[in-house]
Amino acid sequence: MKAVGARLPRYDGIEHVTGRTQYVDDVRVPGTLWTKALRSPVSSATFGGLDTSKAEAMRGVRAVVTAADVPLLEYGHLSALGIPADEPLLAKDEVRYKGQPIAVVAAEDEETAMAAVEAIGIDYEEREPLLDIRRAFDEDAPKIHQWGNWYPHFEGEMDCRQIRKGSIEDAFDQADVIVQGVYRPAAIEHAPLETQVALVVPEANGRLTIYSCTQALYFSMGVVAAHLQLPLNKLKVVGGTVGGGFGGKVDTATETMCALLAQKSGRPVKWRWTREEEFLCSSTRAPWHMEVADAVTNDGWILGRKMLTLHDSGAYARFSPYGLTKHSFHHTGAYTIPNLHFDGYVAFTNRVPTTAMRGFGVTSVSFATETHMSRIADVLGLDPYEVRLKNANRIGDTSPNRIVYTDPSTVAVMKALAGGMDVELAPAYAAMGAAKREGDLLPEHLVSQLADPEAH
Amino acid sequence: MTQATEVLLPASPDEAVAQFGDGAGVTVIGGGTIVVPQLTQGRLKPAKAMLLSNAGLDTLATNGDSITVGAGLPVHRLAELADDARAVAQCALNVADYEVRRQGTVGGNICCDPGPDAPRGDLQGPFLALDAVARSVGANGETSTPLDEFLAHREGRLLLDLRFERPVASAFAALRYPHTHSYTVLAVTGVRSASGETRLAATGLAGLGARLRGAEAAADADAAGRAALEDVELADDALASAWYRERALPVLVRRVLSELEEAA
Amino acid sequence: MNLTVNGVSREVGSAPLTTLLDVLREELGVTSAKAGCEQGGCGSCTVLVDGEPQRACLTAVGAFDGAEVTTVEGIGTADALSPIQQAFTHHYAAQCGFCTGGMLMAAVAYIERGGTDDREAIQEALAGHVCRCTGYVKIIDAVAAAARGDSFDLSTTASSAGMTNLGGVS
C-alpha cells in the first residue's frame, strides 16, 4: 500500500492545465449536425396536432425525430432491478413536466435547429398540475401517472417500502417522551460546469459510435441499445472525462435521441444542452418529506422510531424506488434503534424527474437523523454528544434491515469530532468504544435484539 | 437570425450617430454582456446590430465641476471617479465580477431592460441620484434630458453620454447577500449636491431604478426609511423576495443618510 | 478579419456577431475555452484579449479585428508548463478540469497586474469563476503559490505532503 499517504500525480493533471483534456464537446467530426429540442412549456398537458413538416422542409434541417420514430419508446433504466418502464424517451400525447422533450431536430447549425423547433406545430391542452408531494395522496388530487400517484411495485406488488422491527407500540408505551420532527430538504441541481452533451457518429459498417458524458458507460450503452432495439455489438461508446457529474449524468436519453437523429440523417449529430436546459430540464436530487417520531427515555435511550418518508420522484420513476430502498435501510443513521415502523413512498409530481446525487437516498435521512438526535438532546436537556454515543452502533447491534454490525465506526467518529471541536467528554463517554454492549450500555430494550437479530 | 443581421461597426462617435440614424430596427451592443447571450439563445433576432466597442464613446472627462461619462466607458473605469463621486465608483466596483466589469459599458448598464429573473442596471441608482443629464440621438436628432425622462423614452435612442455636477458628498449601500453572487439585489445611493439638495435613488425595484422622492422630503433618517417603502415597488424574484427587500430598504436608506451626515 | 491567437495570425471568416468562443472552438479548433453557460456567469470561457481577461462567450468577434487572443494552449505546454500551470498541478487545483482553463487565464492576468498571495484579493479576482468540484480552496492555494513565485518539483511522491492547509496560507 505504497499509495496511501503518498503524494501522487493525477493521471489527467497535466492535460487539465494545458487545455488538452477532451470532453465530448471538444471532439471534432466533420459534418456534425446541431440538435435542439421542442420541450413542453407547461407542467402538465395533453397535446395533439404535432406537425413537424415545416421543420423537416426547412433549409439546413437534416432530421426530425418524435415518439413515433423510437423502436422501443419506454424502457425502464432499472428494469433489471424490478422497476418497470414508465417513461417515454419522447413525449407521446401528453407531457408531465415542464421541459419534457417532445421532438428533436438535427440541422446544419444551431440557429437553423432553433428556428426549426419554432416551426413545429403542436396544440397543448393544459391540465391542473400536481406540484406538492403531500397532495399526491389526496382523493381529489389530479391523477398524473398510469400507476396512480405513487409507485406500486416494491417487491413487485407493494405501494410502500416498509421496514418493521420489534414492536413500535411497546416502544411508544414505554417511552417517557415522544420527540417529533418534520424534515424537508429541497431539490438540488447538480449544476456541473459541463452541460449534458452527446455526439453520435453513424459508421460505414452500420455501427454507431457514441461519445457520451455519461458517468456509467456500459449502463448507458444498454439503455441506448434497448430503445433502439439494436444488439450491443452495434454500439461503440466512447466515454471520457466528465465535466462534473455528481450523479446527474447517469440518466440516459441525450445519447439515444442523437442516435436516432444520426440514423435518420446519416450524419454525425451532436447535442450540447444550454445552461438554461441544464437548470430547467435536467434531473435533480429529489426533494424529500420525512416525518420522524422517536420514543425516548428521560436518560436518552431511543426505544423506537416511527417514520414516514415521501420521496418526490417527479414525473417518472427512474431510479427513485432504488434510492428510497437505500434510504429505508439507513433510516436510523449511525444509531441503534430496536423498534421500527418505517413507511416510504415514491410519489409522483409534475416536476422534472429526480435522480441520483452524491449519497443518493441516504444523505436525506442522514440529515433528518442527525438533526433529530440534536432535537432529542434539546428536548431532554441532555448533551448532544452523549445522546449520540449512548445510542451509537456497536458490534452486534443490527441495522434496520437486520444486518449485524461487525465493525461500526460511530463511536470512533464521535470521539474524533469531540476532539476536533475541543469538547471534553465526561469520563464514561470518553472511555466508550465499539465493543459489544454490556452492563450500562445494554438496557433491557436492546437485549432481545442482540440475542436473536433474525427473530427481533 | 443573427447570420442575417446587418452589423454596423462605427469607428468614431460621428459614425455611430450617422449609422444609428433614427434607430429603427437597430440593436445597440456595448460590451455585449447583456445582449450577446440573448443573441446566442435566439431570443433576439435583430435586423441591425451596432457594435460600439470601437466608436470612441469610452470617454471620461472633467470640465470644472461638470463630469461627463461616455456611454461606451467600461464599467470598471468608473473607479476613476473615486474622489469626485465616490458612490459611482463604489457601485461600479460592486457590479458582477472583474471580467464583466471590463466588458460591460455604462450605456449598456444604464439602458438595459429590467432583468426577468434578477436585477440589472445597478448604475441607474447613482446616476439618478446625481440628477445626471443624458445626451442621446435618434429620430428627433440630438437631445439632452434628465436621466429618468431619458430612461422612460429610451426606445429608439442611442445614449452618447451622461453629465452631472460634482456632488459635495455621496454614499452607496448595497444589500450584502452572498449567495446571489454577481447580482446586486438591492442598493441605495445618496447624494448631497453643491446646491445643498439631498437626493436618493434605489435599484432592485420591480422596474427601472428610481428616485426616492418621498424619502428625500422626510424629516429624518427613520422617516426617510419608512417613506422609501411608499416611493417604490420592490422586485420579487428568485434571488430575494419583495418581503425581504422591504425589510432591507429602510436600513440601506438610513445607512446612506448617516454616511452623508458624517461627510458633511 | 484577423485574430492573432497564441502568437499565430489566423484569418476569421465567421459572421461578425459570432461569439469569440464559437470562433475559437468551431472555426479555429481551439477548444480549451469552454461553453459552460454562454451567459458570462461561469467563467469557463475566459481568455485574454490584448492581455485582459474577457468572457469569450460575451464577445461579438466583429469588434475585435486585429486583437491578440491568448488561451491556455498559449501559456505553456506539457514539456514546459508555466508557473501557474505547475502550481495548479502541484496543488491539485483541478478535478474534472472543466473550469480550469478559465481559472488559469484569470490567474495569469491577476499575477501579471501584480496580484499577491492575499487570499481575499485572489477570491475577488476570480469571483466570476465557478467550480463545482474542488470547493475552491486548492485553486486559491495554487494561485497564491504562483503569485509568491513558489517552485515545484512535480515528480515527487513525498509521503503525507499532499494535504492542503484548510485555513490561510502560512
Image: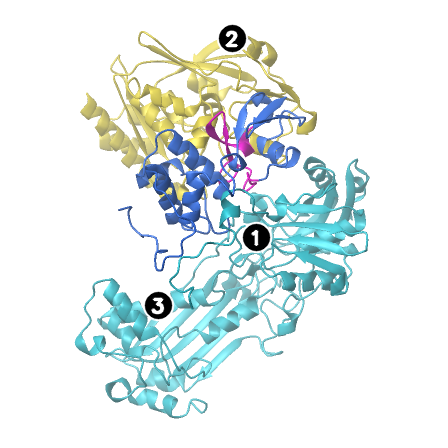
Chain colours: A cyan, B yellow, C blue
Above or below, comparing residue A410 to residue A6 in the picture: below
Q: Which residue is mark 2?
A: B142
Q: Position of residue A404 (x, y in %)?
A: 42, 84
* Amino acid of disc 1: Thr
Is residue B95 visible in this depiction of the protein? no
The image quarter containing residue B203 is: top left
Residue B42 among those drawn in magenta: no
Q: Which residue is mark 3?
A: A370
Q: Could you classify mark 2 by the number of other residues whose Cα lies within 10 Å: few (under 14), some (14-19), or many (20 or more)?
A: some
- Callout 1: chain: A
Q: Position of residue C3 (x, y in %)?
A: 59, 25
Is residue A142 visible in this depiction of the protein? yes
- Callout 3: chain: A
Q: Is residue A72 left or right of residue B222?
A: right
Above or below, comparing residue B98 to residue A404 in the picture: above
Q: Position of residue C79 (x, y in %)?
A: 51, 42
Tell me whether the residue at label 1 lies in contact with that at label 2, contact meaning CB atoms closer than 8 angstroms. Answer: no
* In front of the other: A421 or A441: A421
Q: Residue at x 41, y 27 (%)?
A: B209
Q: Which residue is mark 1?
A: A241
What is the C-alpha distance between the residues marked 1 and 2?
A: 56 Å
